[in-house]
Image: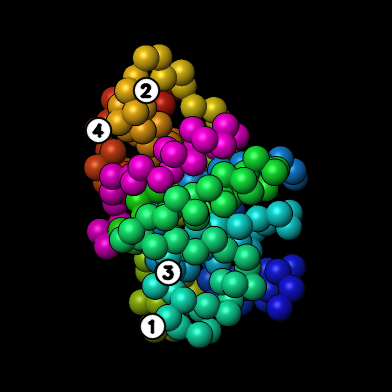
C-alpha cells in the first residue's frame, strides 16, 4: 500500500474511534532532517503520530517483535519503518536512521525503547543520544497522553481522548569535554526532559524531579 494512502486510512480510523487533540502541528517542518523523540504508552502511539504528518519523507524505528505478526509487519513495512532488535541493538539500523536524517528525512524514535507499563517516563536508552549526536539535526519532543486507555475505553463503548503535543525544534546543548558515556547521558536526559516538560506531572516518571526539567518548566 502507498504510504500516503495508508496514512489517510489510519487517520480516518483513529479520528473516528478517538477524540484526538493535536497541538503544535505547525512545529513540524515541511522538509529537512528532524529527529522526533516520543514517549511510549501504547502501540497506538505510532499510528496516532503517523496520521498527523503531511510530509512523505518519514520513517521510524520499530521493534522486530512486530515482524512476527503478518498484519503488523505488512502495515509497518508499508509505512517504511526501520526494523531494530531491541534486545541486541544493531549498528546497521542506527546507521540507516542517521543516513535518512542527513538526507533530509524525519525519523521517529521512542527513547525509552519499550512501552511504559506505568504510564510514567522511563530512563532513555543510548540509541536516541547516538542518533542525535551522529545526525546533527534538530530534535522535536513529542508528548503523548491517553493512548494507554484507548482499548479499555473502547471496550466500554466510549471514545477515548488522546492528545499529542509537538514541541518547537531544539538543538542539543554543547557537551564541553564530556566523555562518551557522559555525553550520551547528557543528550538523552535533555531529550527526555523536553518531552517531560510537555506532559502532565503524572506522566513524567523518573524525570519528574530532574534539575533540567525544573529549568525548562520555569521558562
Task: Mark 1 or mark 3: name the one nearer the start of the chain.
Answer: 3
Image coords of residue 123 (percent x, y)? 28, 44
Disc 3: CA contacts within 10 A as few (<14), some (14-19) or many (>=20): some
Q: Determine whether the residue tagged by mark 3 lies in a helix, strand or loop.
A: helix
Residue 50, magenta (yes or no): no
| Image side of residue 204 versus residue 110, left or right | left
On the image, numbered disc 1 is attached to which residue? 156
Q: Determine whether the residue tagged by mark 2 lies in a helix, strand or loop.
A: helix
Q: Quadrant of the N terminus?
A: bottom right
Task: Mark 4 or mark 1: name the one nearer the start of the chain.
Answer: 1
- Cα distance, mark 3 to mark 2? 37 Å
The residue positioned 24% from the left and 33% from the top of the image is: 209
* Region of the chain picked out in magenta, as a range: 117-139
On the image, numbered disc 3 is attached to which residue? 64
The residue positioned 60% from the left and 61% from the top of the image is: 50
Image coords of residue 114 (percent x, y)? 34, 59
Task: Mark 3 or mark 2: name the one nearer the start of the chain.
Answer: 3
- Cα distance, mark 2 to mark 4? 10 Å
Task: Mark 1 or mark 2: name the one nearer the start of the chain.
Answer: 1
Q: Which mark is residue 209?
A: 4
Disc 2: CA contacts within 10 A as few (<14), some (14-19) or many (>=20): few
Q: Quadrant of the C terminus?
A: top left
Answer whether labels 1 and 2 touch (C-beta < 8 Å). Answer: no
Q: Residue farthest to the top?
A: 176
In the displayed structure, 16 sits above or below 211; it is below
Task: Mark 3 or mark 4: name the one nearer the start of the chain.
Answer: 3
In the displayed structure, 20 sits above or below 103; it is below
Q: Is residue 169 visible?
A: no
In the displayed structure, 158 sits above or below 92; it is below
Residue 130, magenta (yes or no): yes
Amino acid at each position: 500500500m502507498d504510504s500516503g494512502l495508508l496514512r489517510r486510512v489510519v487517520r480516518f480510523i483513529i479520528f473516528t474511534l478517538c477524540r484526538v487533540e493535536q497541538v503544535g502541528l505547525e512545529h513540524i517542518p515541511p522538509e529537512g532532517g528532524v529527529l522526533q523523540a516520543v514517549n511510549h504508552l501504547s502501540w497506538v502511539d505510532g499510528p496516532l503520530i503517523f496520521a498527523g504528518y503531511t510530509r512523505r519523507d518519514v520513517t521510524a524505528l520499530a521493534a522486530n517483535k512486530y515482524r512476527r505478526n503478518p498484519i503488523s509487519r505488512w502495515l509497518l513495512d508499508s509505512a517504511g519503518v526501520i526494523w531494530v532488535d531491541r534486545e541486541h541493538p544493531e549498528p546497521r539500523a542506527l546507521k540507516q536512521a542517521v543516513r535518512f536524517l542527513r538526507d533530509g528525512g524525519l525519523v521517529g524514535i521512542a527513547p525509552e525503547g519499550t512501552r511504559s507499563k506505568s504510564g510514567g517516563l522511563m530512563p532513555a536508552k543510548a540509541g536516541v543520544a547516538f542518533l542525535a549526536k551522529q545526525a546533527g539535526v534538530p530534535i522535536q519532543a513529542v508528548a503523548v497522553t491517553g493512548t494507554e486507555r484507548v482499548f479499555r475505553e473502547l471496550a466500554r463503548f466510549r471514545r477515548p481522548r488522546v492528545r499529542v503535543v509537538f514541541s518547537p525544534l531544539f538543538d542539543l546543548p554543547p557537551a564541553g569535554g564530556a566523555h562518551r558515556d557522559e555525553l550520551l547521558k547528557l543528550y538523552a536526559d535533555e531529550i527526555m526532559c523536553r518531552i517531560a516538560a510537555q506532559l502532565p506531572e503524572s506522566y513524567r516518571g523518573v524525570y519528574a524531579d530532574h534539575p533540567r526539567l525544573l529549568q525548562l518548566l520555569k521558562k
